Amino acid sequence: MEAHSHTRSRDSFLHVADSMGVSRPVAVKALDNIVSGKVAALVVSGPQASGKDTIGPAVMVALGYPDHIRVGISDSLKQEVTDALELLTSLTDMDSAWEQVASLLGVTDAHARHLVGILWGETRDPLADLTGWSRTTGIRRALQYLGNEAREDDPTRYVRLAVPRILDSMAQGVSLYMGDGRFPREAAPCSALGMYLVRLFVDSEVKAARLLARDGVIADPSTLHHEGEYALDGWNGVDLKINNSYASSKEVVGVISGAFAAHRARLALDLK
């Protein structure tokens, strides 16, 4: 385990909110709810099969926020892939499909061709009923490609879409956890908004076994070694780093919950 103390400020909170197009009244209400402890906001990031969606909700319950919601920076990205899947399922000509994908997603022709190449085979089985939330190798490759390479000219697109939803939820008194935020460009704004950033690690052999048990397939090396899997590993903005390979979920939740309590006390002073 490795813990760090990062100072947040009211000014940085409001600056991020302003830059992401959130109205000042909504931002101030969200900020006040955090300071008072009415809401809690947690980010649990990590590579595939590190236990993000097991640990995150359990921590929120342990902290006394059972009615929390899950919000993901990748939600809009997954919806875009879902839209592309629905379009491709309706088409029969792969050679011309890229033009419609380019128009649908607002990406270049070259990126659209690449995405069609990834997704076309996924859409040939009408009974598969795949979405951007499915855990096939092809869907994961498409998410990684669309979220990074295809959006290289707009790298903050998905965090800009997520922050208004995050602050609106907190302004309404709804606590939340996030199971992604894979890059510093995504994690840094979340940190400024008072979210507690936990980074989970998992040993390679444990990861492989979990992926096989969960998804029924051997993990694809190209997705395992994508930049998004490790971009936060050396970033110094993470509040808590913890190995989730062998400890029980109860132990990991206990460690995170204790560290979060100290973070919440600091926030009450830093954001006041």
Image (cartoon, rainbow, N blue to C red):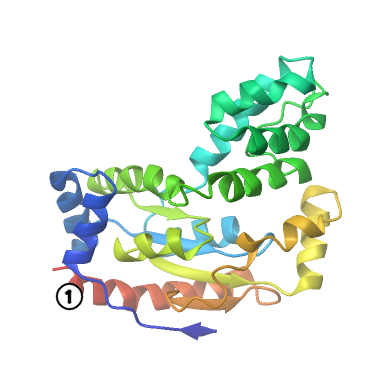
The residue positioned 35% from the left and 60% from the top of the image is 189
Q: Position of residue 133 (x, y in %)?
A: 63, 39
Could you tell whether 45 is left or right of 130 in the image?
A: left
Q: Nearer the viewer, residue 70 or 7?
A: 7
Quadrant in which residue 37 is drawn: bottom left
Label 1: which residue?
Answer: 269
Q: Image point 70% across, 74% down: which residue?
A: 245
Q: Secondary structure at mark 1?
A: helix
133 to 39, vertically: above or below: above
Q: How many marks?
A: 1
Of 54 and 221, which appears nearest the observer?
221
Looking at the image, residue 243 sits to the left or right of residue 205; the answer is: left
Quadrant for residue 65, please give it: bottom left
> Is residue 235 or residue 180 the one in the foreground?
235
Inspect this view and state whether residue 214 appears: yes
Q: Residues within 10 Å of mark 1 (few under 14, many from 20)?
A: few
Say what amino acid the circle numbered 1 marks. Answer: Leu
Q: Residue at x 56, y 33 (%)?
A: 80
Give percent across and percent down for residue 200: 58, 70
Q: Nearer the viewer, residue 135 or 152?
A: 152
- Does the image show residue 255? no
Above or below, 4 relative to 219: below
